[in-house]
Amino acid sequence: MTYTAEVPSDVSSTRMRNLIARLGVACMTAAFLSGVLKSFWELSRPLLNDLQAFASAPPAQIWGHAILEVIKPAGFLAGLFGFYLCATKRGLATKLFMALAVFGGVFYASVWLWIAATIHFTIIYVLGGMWYQMIAPVALGIAALFARRVPWWNGVWAIIVGVLNAQIFPLLGPARALFVQGIIWLVFGYLVYNLRRRA
């Protein structure tokens, strides 16, 4: 006869809370580095607003930007995954949007690494960015409102994050938009971090 050891619920709950906390911290870290910090770098040494500046920039600067753009989807997806775990019912539709967000993040990071390697700027990375920066937050926010597992304003904030991400770059330009993006994702990461108490 075989016996299956039962895992105490308090142990699994503690692990889940720790996971959610780490995901929230990862999101906040990425928001600060690739948003707030990068915005000041872009203001002091513009790279994204002028193709000539990009072409003449030292490789170290381009690679620095590329590394921050790899950190961005990793951290933002961590925040989205934490929100997905805590705030939604994890149904088929939300799983699909999370999967598309992951594919978008991988595409986004890959294009930026290609940009750094070839020193050939292309805006095609936006096609990946829209999935994890704009569409996924709105989809998860709506799912959270229907699930009612967290306060309603958590879902509303996720929707706001997605909508603002779609608007800020055309309206503000790269440097200021990066700062705003960093702030809104920093708040989102903190929101996810606080959701650990509900895990």
Image (cartoon, rainbow, N blue to C red):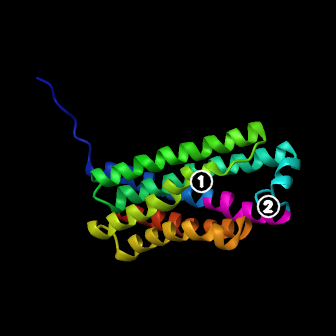
Farthest residue toward the bottom?
153
Q: Which stretch did the figure color magenta? A: 31-44
In the shown orientation, is residue 115 left or right of residue 181? right
Mark 2 vs 1: CB contact within 8 A: no
Residue 38 among magenta residues: yes
Q: Residue drawn at (78%, 41%), measured in percent from left and top?
A: 119
Residue 129 among magenta residues: no
Q: Nearer the viewer, mark 2 or mark 1?
A: 1
Q: Say which mark, if any, is on residue 14.
A: none
In the shown orientation, is residue 158 left or right of residue 71? left
Residue 74 seen:
yes
Vertical comparison of 180 with 134: above or below: below
Vertical comparison of 145 with 118: above or below: below
In the shown orientation, is residue 124 left or right of residue 78? right
The percent position of residue 18, horizontal first and vertical second, equals 44, 53
- Name the quadrant of the C terminus: bottom left
- Name the quadrant of the N terminus: top left
Q: Say which mark, if any, is on residue 41.
A: 2
The percent position of residue 161, horizontal first and vertical second, equals 51, 68
Q: Say which mark, if any, is on residue 126.
A: 1
